[in-house]
Image (tube, helix red, strand yellow):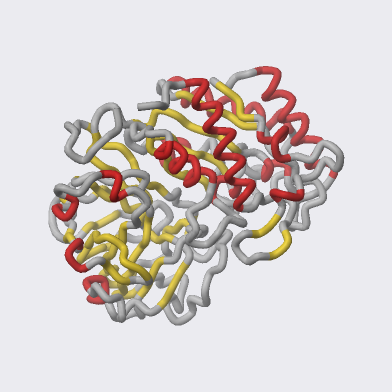
Amino acid sequence: MPVSCSAPASHWVTIWAASAQGVYPVGGTIAQPDLRSALPSAASGMVDQAMRMIVRPAQLAPRIRLRCSNAFGERAIHLRDLHVGLHLGGGALVPWTLVRGTARNGDTLVVPPGQTCWTAPIDLPWMSGMPARCLKGNDLAVSCAVEGTSGPLTWHAKAMTTSYLSAPGEPDACCDIDAMRLPYTTTSWYFLNAVDAWLPTSVRCLVGYGDSLTDGTATTLNGHDRWTDVLQRQLWFQGCDDLVVVNAGIGGNQIAGPEPGAGPTRGGPAAIERLGRDLLSLSGVQTVVWIEGINDFSDNGQRSAATVLNACRRAVDQLRARGLQVIGATIPSALGSTRPGHGGIWQDEQRRAFNAALRQHKFFDALVDLDALMTDPVTGQMRDSFNGDSTFGEPGDGVHPNRAGHACMAQAVLDVLSAQVHLTP
C-alpha cells in the first residue's frame, strides 16, 4: 500500500544521507567554485558564518530530524538559528515553509569533536493536507550559522548539488528567505550528514554504499541522476513508496583501504572501517547495495583481489549479522582510463579476478552483474555509450559512467530487487 503523510507513523527512517569523509579541502570535488572568499582559511573553517545546504529527501513526512557530524573536527562546533524550508530556487526558500529547529537541550546544537548529534524532532506544518505525491522530488533547504570559529570543517566533498554560504561575519544570513546574504556557492555539504522522517513501520531504507560510482562523478550537477536517485524515481513510478533510497558513497573510497602507514586518503576511511558510522547508524535500514572495489586496485590502493575480497566478505558478514539484506555488484572496467591512477593492466587483472570470485562464491544475498552490462566484451573497456562526462559535457575518463550509465545501473539494481522482494503496491 502506498505511503501517505496521513498514515500512522511509528519509527524513524533515514530519507537522506551524505557520508562524512574528512576535512575541507581534502576530497574529490566536482565543479567546485572558488571558495577563497567564503572560506579563506581551512584551519579556521567557518567564522560566524551562515550556510544553506540543499538536499533532496527520498520521502518527506510532517516530522523530521537532522543529524550533524563533527567526525573530523578538532573542537566543538556550535550551530545556531537552525531552520528548514522548502527550496524555491537558487538559495531562496518558499516563504511560508520556513520552520525553526532546535537542539534537544536548547536552541544551539553543540557537536563535540569526533561525534554526531541529532536535533530535536522538527514539525513541518506546511505539509498538512498536502498529498504525498505532490512532495516527491522536492528539495529541502537546511540553514544554520556557525557561532564563533568552527576549526577544520567535516564535509562531504562531492555533493553534485549546489548549496550556499555567507561571507564570514554574516551569521544572521541563515534566516534570510531571499538568500541575498548567501552569495557564495559550493558543491559540497558541511556538517549535515543525515535527515530522518517519522514514517510508518512498513517503510524501510535502502542504502547505496560505495565509491564514486555511487557518489556520482560524471553525473549532472543538480540533475539528481546518480543511480540511487534514478532507482528512487523508478520505485515511485512502480507505486512502491515503502522503500526509500539514500546514498552513502564517497568518491575515491576503498574497501580495504591503502597499505598501513599510507596516511589519510581523499576517499575517506575504508568501507570496512566506516560501516558503523555511515551505514549501521542510519535509521530503518533494510537493504544495502554494495558497489565498490576499483580504487583498491588503482595505483593509490595496490591491493590484491584476494585481500579486497577478504575485506569485503568480513564487511558483509557484519551487515548480515545485523539482519540486513546485502546486494553486491561486479565492478565495471576501468581499462584504458585517462583518470590518474587508473587504467592499467594489473588493475584490470585484479578487477576481473575479484568479479570472478563474486560470481563463484555468492556470499552476497544477490549479485548485480554491472561488469557484464557496462564493459565492452570486445575492447575490455567501458562501453562507449556509458563513457562520458555529463557534468561538463566532456569526453569520459573510462572509469566513471555518465548519466546513461547510472540509469543502466539503477535498472540493473531494480531488476534484482524485483526478483528479491515484492515492490508493487
**Residue displayed at 60% across by 40% down:** 409
Look at 24% across and 48% down and name the residue there.
Answer: 65
Res 311 seen here: no
User: Percent position (x, y) of residue 127?
Assistant: 19, 51
Q: Is residue 407 left or right of residue 224?
A: right
Quarter of the figure with the C terminus? top left
| Residue in view at x 49 percent, y 79 percent | 36
| Quarter occupied by the N terminus | top left
Q: Nearer the viewer, residue 327 or 410?
A: 410
In the visual, does 186 lie left or right of 133?
right
Residue toward you, 17 or 180? 180
Q: Residue at x 80, y 46 (%)?
A: 335
Label count reads: 0
The picture quadrant where one finds residue 333 is: top right
Q: Is residue 8 above or below residue 96?
A: above
* Front position in the image: 161 or 32: 161
Using the image, determine if residue 416 lies above or below residue 127. Answer: above
Q: Is residue 129 visible?
A: yes
Image coordinates of residue 275 in percent, x first then y, are 47, 36
- Which percent across, then down, holds residue 100? 17, 60
Query: In the picture shown, does residue 222 fall above or below 326?
Result: below
Residue 368 x/y as whole percent: 61, 29
